[in-house]
Image (cartoon, rainbow, N blue to C red):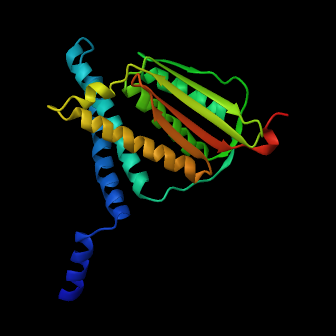
Amino acid sequence: MNHQSLNESLDAAAQPAPEMLARVVRHEVGNLLQKLYATVAILQARLPADWEMEQRMLAGLKDRARDCKDWLEVMHDLVCPVEIAVEPVDLAALVAERVGAAQERFRQTVMQAEATTPSWVRADPAQIRRVFDLLLTNAGVSRAISIGCRATVSSSKDEVECTISAVGPARLAELEGASTSGSGSHYLTCARFGLALARRLVQLQGGRFTATEQPDGGFSASVVLPAEAARVPP
C-alpha cells in the first residue's frame, strides 16, 4: 500500500459512515457480552447456592448485560437498514404472547392483553414483536402499576389498531430530578431511542405510530397496521 492510498484509508476511518460504525460497535461489544454471559453462567454453577449475595450480584450483572445488548440492537437498527418481510400475523395473539413474556420480567407490574378475538394484519412477525417488546419494556422499566393492551379492527376493516396504556406512577419524574448520578438523563435517552425505533419499525411496515405521555406520568401508544383483508372477520 503506497502512502497516498494509506492516507486515503485513514481519512475514511476518521470519518466512518454511521452504518459502519454501528456495525463495528455491535460486533465488538456483542462479543464482550457473550463472554460475560458465559463467565456468569460458569460462576453461577460453581458458587454454592447459599452464597446469596454473590448469586444476586451475578444475576444482576446478567440482567444488566441483557439490557445492554437490547439497547445495542436498538442503536444499530436506528442507524442501519432494517429488512422487512410482511406476512399475515394475528396481532392479538402476538401481543398476548409478548405481554406474557414481559410479565415474567416485570412481576411488579400488572399486565393484561384485552383482545380475545383474532386481529389479522400484514406485518413482519419478528419486527412487530420487537415493537411491542420495546413498548412493554419501556413501561416496565418505568415501574408502571398496570399496563393494558387492546387490539381493535377499524370500522372500515382495513386497519387494526393496538393501544398500550401504562398507568403510573412512572419513574420519569423521579429520574428527571436525579441530576447527581445522571441516571435520569440516561433513562430518558434510552426510552426515547426505544420509542423512535418502535415508530420506525411500524412505519416500515406501512403502519402508523403515536405515543403520548399522560399527566400521571404514564404513557399511551398506538400502533396501527394494515389489516389482512382475507382474514378480517365479516
Against 9, is 195 above or below? Answer: above
Q: Residue furthest front?
A: 215
Query: In percent of the image, x 49 and y 37: which residue is there?
Result: 211
Residue 131 visible in the shown view? yes
Q: The C terminus is located in which quarter?
A: top right
Q: Position of residue 57 (x, y in %)?
A: 23, 23
Q: Where does the image place residue 181, in percent across and percent down from the top left?
A: 16, 32
Q: Position of residue 17 (x, y in %)?
A: 34, 67
Q: Residue at x 23, y 33 (%)?
A: 183
Quadrant position of the N terminus in the picture: bottom left
Query: In the image, what residue occupies the spot 38% across and 19% down?
Result: 169
In the picture as drawn, the residue positioned furthest to the right comes out as 234
Residue in front for this viewpoint, 147 or 87:
147
Q: Nearer the viewer, residue 28 or 131?
A: 131
Q: Is residue 86 above or below residue 117?
A: below
- Which residue is the extreme one toward the left? 180
In the picture provided, is 234 more to the left or to the right than 100?
A: right
* 123 on left or right of 138: right
